[in-house]
Image (spheres, grey):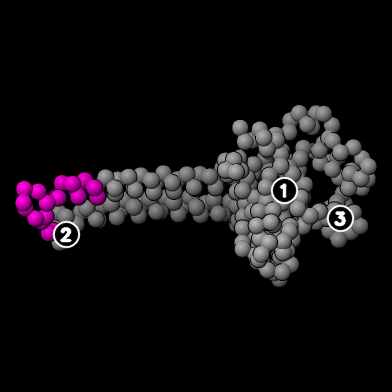
Amino acid sequence: MLYRYFSAASTYAHSVDFVIILIAVIVGFWLIVAEFVFFGFLFKYRASNGQPTRYITGEEKELKKWISIPHMLVIVCDIAILASAIYVWYEVKQVMPPAEHTVRIYGQQWAWTFQDPGPDGVFDTADDIRTTGELHVLVDSTYHYELMARDVVHSFAVPSFRLKQDAVPGRTIMGWFKATRAGAYDIQCTQMCGLGHALMAGRIIVETPQEHAAWLLRQENPSAPASAPAVAQADRVTVAEVRR
Ligand SMILES: [Cu+2]
C-alpha cells in the first residue's frame, strides 16, 4: 500500500518530497538532541548519596543559555522550512504553466467523473468523452483541471503525483499537473464526504501518445483494438515496476 507514496510520477512530486524530508530531518535531529539533553540531565542531577536533587530556577544568565541558544537555532530551522514550503507552494499552486490539455473533474457522492473535451479540444461538444472512475491522460503533457463538486466537499488526491485539491460545491477550482511516468495510479477522495467516502476511489491512467491515441479511437469506435501498439507497451512503466 505504501508504494504509492514512494512512486513519484509528476513534475512537482520531488519538490513536495523535498519539503517532507527536510521537515523529517530537522525535527528528527532536534528530537534526538532534546532527548539526549533531557535524559542526560535527569541522570546527572539525580538524587544520590542521600542528597536531594538541587532545585534550579533557571533564572541565572548561565542557565538561560540552555533555552535561548536552542530557541534561536530552532527559529532558523523554522525559517528554512517556511522558505522551502512557500517555494514549493508557489510552484504547485500559485503558477499555472500553459496548458496543453484541459480536463474537467467532478466529485460526487461517491464517485469521480471526468470530462475530456475530445479531439476538438472544446468542452460541451458532441465528441466530449465522459468517464467514471478513470481518467486517461498523456505522459509528459501539462494538464489543467477544472475541479467541481456536485454535492458536498470532496478532495481530489493523486498520491503518486503529490497532488491534493479540495472540490467545493458552487466553485470551479483550477489546478495543473504534468505526469512524468506512464502507468496507472490511484485517485482518492481525502475529505470525509459521507457513508461511501471509502469507496470513492479511481484510477488515473498515464499513457504514451500511442496508447492515448488508441484510447481516443476506442471512444469513437468501441470495437477498435483494446491493446496499444507493441512499441507503446515496451516503454510503459507499470505499477508493478514502480513498486519494485
Ligand atoms: Cu468524496
Q: Secondary structure at mark 1?
A: strand
Residue at image position (38%, 45%) is 28
Where residue 137 appears, as percent x and y from the top left, is 76, 46
The magenta segment is: 38-56
Q: Quadrant of residue 71?
A: bottom left
Judged left or right of residue 122, residue 198 is left
Residue 150 lies, with reference to residue 101, above or below; the image says below
Q: CA distance from mark 2 to mark 3?
A: 71 Å
Which quadrant: the C terminus?
Answer: top right
At label 2, the amino acid type is: Gly
Q: Quadrant of residue 57?
A: bottom left
Residue at image position (66%, 64%) is 195
- Going from N to C along the chain, the mark reached first, 3 or 1, is 3
Q: Secondary structure at mark 3?
A: loop
On residue 58, which mark appears? 2
Name the foreground residue: 208 vs 227: 227
Residue 130 lies, with reference to residue 2, above or below; the image says below
Where residue 127 appears, as percent x and y from the top left, is 90, 54
Q: Nearer the viewer, mark 3 or mark 1?
A: 1
Q: Is residue 83 visible?
A: yes
Where residue 123 appears, as percent x and y from the top left, is 84, 58
Q: CA distance from mark 1 to mark 2?
A: 58 Å
At label 3, the amino acid type is: Asp
